[in-house]
Image (cartoon, rainbow, N blue to C red):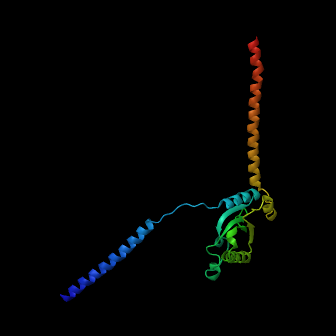
Amino acid sequence: MLKAFGLIILGLIVLAVIAAVASKKNKATDAKIGYEYKSKVLLTPNEREMYWKLIDALPGYVVLAQVALSSCINAKKGGAFNTISAKSLDFVICNGSLDVLAGIEIDDKSHATAAAQKRDAAKNSAMEAAGIKLIRWPAVPLPSIEEIRKIFPAVPLAATEKSTLESTQEKKIKILEQQLFSMARKLEKIPRDSNAAGA
């Protein structure tokens, strides 16, 4: 009898533990459901202006924005990785094969603090060790297109890009020819109609 009673008590304890665990899981799920997520602007107005300057200045290059430093640099887990984790580059310039050529940082007033300068120094060291050029420009004034082009050599258009460009130009010429031909036909009809009316 006592043995059976003991088993019943043990069973009740097990059920209570299971119920408590399930309750915690439900609460955790409810908390996650209650999270709020909102979209945010990827670039500041100043960064957007710089992005379009880079696009205009560097045809033939690939311009990426807000790239994690760990996406550009390999580092072993631990001390080395900790120096680059949770850090990003304002812009990354790649070639057509998406090889990283350089990183670009736009330094505003926030970079003047001691903590920011320490982070910048760590970023500079990591990029230098990885053999990747890191260019720093002030936020005000932003570099001109000419200044950007002085750093990056012009990339000649690939044969496929040339053929595509030529094909587009040929299409435009054909459209213009058709429009001119149509206008000429209309002009030809004008004297005939007036002569017919006078007769």
Q: Which of 162 and 42 is in front in this view?
A: 42
Q: Is residue 23 left or right of residue 167?
A: left
Q: Which of 44 and 181 is in front in this view?
A: 44
Q: Residue furthest bottom?
A: 2
Q: Position of residue 102 (x, y in %)?
A: 73, 68
Q: Residue furthest top?
A: 199
Quadrant of the rendering where the N terminus is positioned: bottom left
Q: Quadrant of residue 151?
A: bottom right
Q: Is residue 160 left or right of residue 12?
A: right
Q: In which quarter of the image is residue 178?
A: top right
Q: Which residue: 67% across, 70% down?
A: 110
Q: In this view, does 127 lie above or below 50?
A: below
Q: Which of 130 and 148 is in front in this view?
A: 148
Q: In which quarter of the image is residue 33?
A: bottom left
Q: Where is residue 25 in the image (x, y as percent from the top left)?
A: 39, 73
Q: Which residue: 69% across, 71% down?
A: 111
Q: Which of 17 and 169 is in front in this view?
A: 17
Q: In this view, does 195 lie to the left or right of 113?
A: right
Quadrant of the rendering where the C terminus is positioned: top right
Q: Which residue: 75% across, 38% down?
A: 174
Q: Position of residue 77 (x, y in %)?
A: 61, 80
Q: Which residue: 75% across, 49% down?
A: 165
Report the number of numbered marks. 0
Q: Position of residue 114 (x, y in %)?
A: 68, 77
